[in-house]
Image: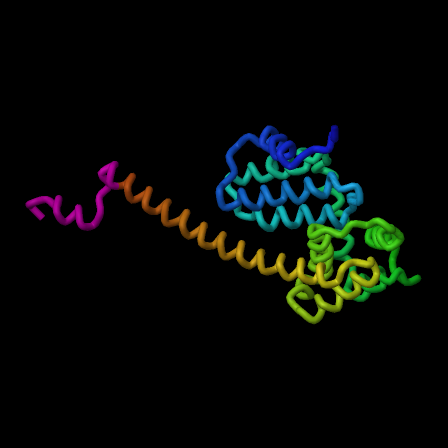
Amino acid sequence: MSNVRTVSDTKRLFYTIHTRPISSIYRRIVEELIVEMHLLSVNIDFSYDAVYALGVVTTFNRFMQGYRPDNDKESIFQALCRAIEADPQQYRSDAEKLSAEASESSKDVLLATLKLTDDAPEGAIKNLVRAIAGSDSFKYSRLFGIGLYSLLEAVNPELVKDKEQIAEMVEAFSSSLSLPEDKLSKDIETYQLSLDKMIQAQIVLSDMVKADRKKREEREAKKSGASTPENEEVTASPDA
């Protein structure tokens, strides 16, 4: 009998760790992450690395932005990692270090690092490139692709707004790391589109929350007998 955890096992453990209800607009995001991270964690060819961690952390932070109550976000992230028997602090720490290193770099330096040229600076990114380029069994994943995109964004936020520059970097990543170029390009494009849709959904949700709050305040004002300009005219003193 196989002892490999199932998706149901992982989901059950997640909801045991995070016991509060998850807001409906975010539930699908969380459950998709649970499934994706689970399937990778039980894949014999999968190996954790900092780029993957950056992809997980960035995806979570971006798509959970605006979640209420805000304090629940960390509990959900902790549960995501612990449900696949991973260390959430390691994910955050590795992602932060990689992003910080990229933010002090440039596009040209990143390209040199990908090519492992002699003048490329030593660091976490170069070590990862060496390890992945020298591996015969590296398994590419969508979250790894988002991690690469996040590296570009850390190098220069304007870079990811330019389709030609993204295409150039995708080609460089694919060539140096033996990644499926079409798949990486498609994953990045889908990620960008999903972000745009999520931002729009969050704006709509924010407007709905504001409208609902205004209605509640108006109902409470009426219940408490708060005066309105119209009421003041009706109840004005006869001596006025």
Quarter of the image containing the N terminus? top right
Q: Position of residue 76 (x, y in %)?
A: 60, 37
Residue at 58% over, 42% down: 30
Taking the view exactly as shown, the residue that stands out farthest to the right is 118
Instruction: Return the residue nearer the eye: 158 or 205.
Output: 205
Using the image, determine if residue 24 lies above or below residue 16.
below
**Looking at the picture, how far across and down is residue 66, in whole percent?**
53, 47
Q: Quadrant of residue 8?
A: top right
Residue shown at the point (37%, 49%) measured from the top left: 211
Give the residues drawn in magenta, as a range.
222-240
Queried whether the magenta region covers residue 32, the answer comes back as no
> For the image shown, how many numbered marks are present on the structure?
0
Residue at the extreme bottom of the image, as rendered: 164
Residue 155 x/y as whole percent: 73, 60
Q: Looking at the picture, tell me which residue is in the foreground, 230 or 32.
A: 32
State left or right for residue 216 relative to residue 102.
Answer: left
Its colouring scheme is rainbow
At 41% from the left edge and 47% from the top edge, which residue is drawn?
209
Residue 161, relative to residue 16: is it above or below?
Answer: below
Furthest residue to the front?
1
- Does the magenta portion include 231? yes
* 213 sits to left or right of 47: left
